[in-house]
């Protein structure tokens, strides 16, 4: 596994600096490839990722490029290809417009994006207990757009300044979720979201905290955790139905809704 500790703008090593310069030099060609592959990308006045103009050399654009380099473990060729695919995805799916789009009623009222965790990361809280599971998870494309909208709103709270937090804290509250929650319909929608986020939202996962997590789910998670890379596994925190107080190790009280 590659050492990624110096692949951050505020502690950039010489090797990482050269890889960043390499990727930046390819940007005109990468933009052209995206426009060639997508009519929507071709029609766009400017192609950006999370509102950041990659072709303009700033701390923000360097931070975004380094995210792609880290995600591909310092392989610049793979990072370049992922950037092209992400630009195409954002243009074709009109992701830039999602942040201000109104959600269908079944997706409203379950999420809070507010405040910052103890390390300064933006916090996104989702409560699954009162969801109409069939309505929320039944349309996979709509579910992906719903979760992508939340990600765009949360990422908009990042400063993209050197040395400041670059990822998010997500809290998933399972209070009131029935044990039949993991139906094939739910799994299909969650798998689709996981694929989109892993491909097009690199290095945005800081900590994901599962709150009020039923024992049955915890056992399943433990069984499957052997298949999760250690670097990713460290980003998950499982808090059971009696562990709510531990949440405040990660979030200040004012960041937690009642």
Image (cartoon, rainbow, N blue to C red):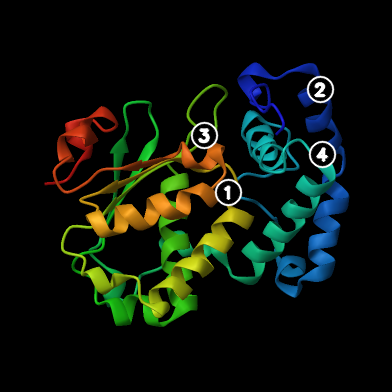
Locate residue 136 relative to residue 77 in the image: left or right.
left
Residue 145 in the image, given as x and y percentages of width and height: 47, 69
N-term mark: 1 or 2 = 2
**Circle 4 sits on which residue?**
23
Closer to viewer: mark 4 or mark 1: 4
Q: Quadrant of residue 160?
A: top right
Asked if labels 2 and 4 touch by Cβ distance under 8 angstroms, the answer is no
As drawn, 59 above or below 189: above
Give the spatial CA distance, label 4 vs label 1: 19 Å
N-term mark: 1 or 3 = 1
Crowd band around label 4 with a 10 angstrom C-alpha radius: few (<14), some (14–19), many (20+): many
Check disc 1 and report its element: helix, strand or loop.
loop
**Circle 1 sits on which residue?**
51
As drawn, 15 above or below 238: above
Q: Which mark identifies residue 15? A: 2
Asked if labels 4 and 3 touch by Cβ distance under 8 angstroms, the answer is no
N-term mark: 3 or 2 = 2
- Closer to us: 164 or 240: 240
**Residue at position x 23%, y 36% from top?**
247
Closer to viewer: mark 1 or mark 3: 3
Give the spatial CA distance, label 1 vs label 3: 14 Å
**Circle 3 sits on which residue?**
166
Crowd band around label 3 with a 10 angstrom C-alpha radius: few (<14), some (14–19), many (20+): many
């Amino acid at each position: 596994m590659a050492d990624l500790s110096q692949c951050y703008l505020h502690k950039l090593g010489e090797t990482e600096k050269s890889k960043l310069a390499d990727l930046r030099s390819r940007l005109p060609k990468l933009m052209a490839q995206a426009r060639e592959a997508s009519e929507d990308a071709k029609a766009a006045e400017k192609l950006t990722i999370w509102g950041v103009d990659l072709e303009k050399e700033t701390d923000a654009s360097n931070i975004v490029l380094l995210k792609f380099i880290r995600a591909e473990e310092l392989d610049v060729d793979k990072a370049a290809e992922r950037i092209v695919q992400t630009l195409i995805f954002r243009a074709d799916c009109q992701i830039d417009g999602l942040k201000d789009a109104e959600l269908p009623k079944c997706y409203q009222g379950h999420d809070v994006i507010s405040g910052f965790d103890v390390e300064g990361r933006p916090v996104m809280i989702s409560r699954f207990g009162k969801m109409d599971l069939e309505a929320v998870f039944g349309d996979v494309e709509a579910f992906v757009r719903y979760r992508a909208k939340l990600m765009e709103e949360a990422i908009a709270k990042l400063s993209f300044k050197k040395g400041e937090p670059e990822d998010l804290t997500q809290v998933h509250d399972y209070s009131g979720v029935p044990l039949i929650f993991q139906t094939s319909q739910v799994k299909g929608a969650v798998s689709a979201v996981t694929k989109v986020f892993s491909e097009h939202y690199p290095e945005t996962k800081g900590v994901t905290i599962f709150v009020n997590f039923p024992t049955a789910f915890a056992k399943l998670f433990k069984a499957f955790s052997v298949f999760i890379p250690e670097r990713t596994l460290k980003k998950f925190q499982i808090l059971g139905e009696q562990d709510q107080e531990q949440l405040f190790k990660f979030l200040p009280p004012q960041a937690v809704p009642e």
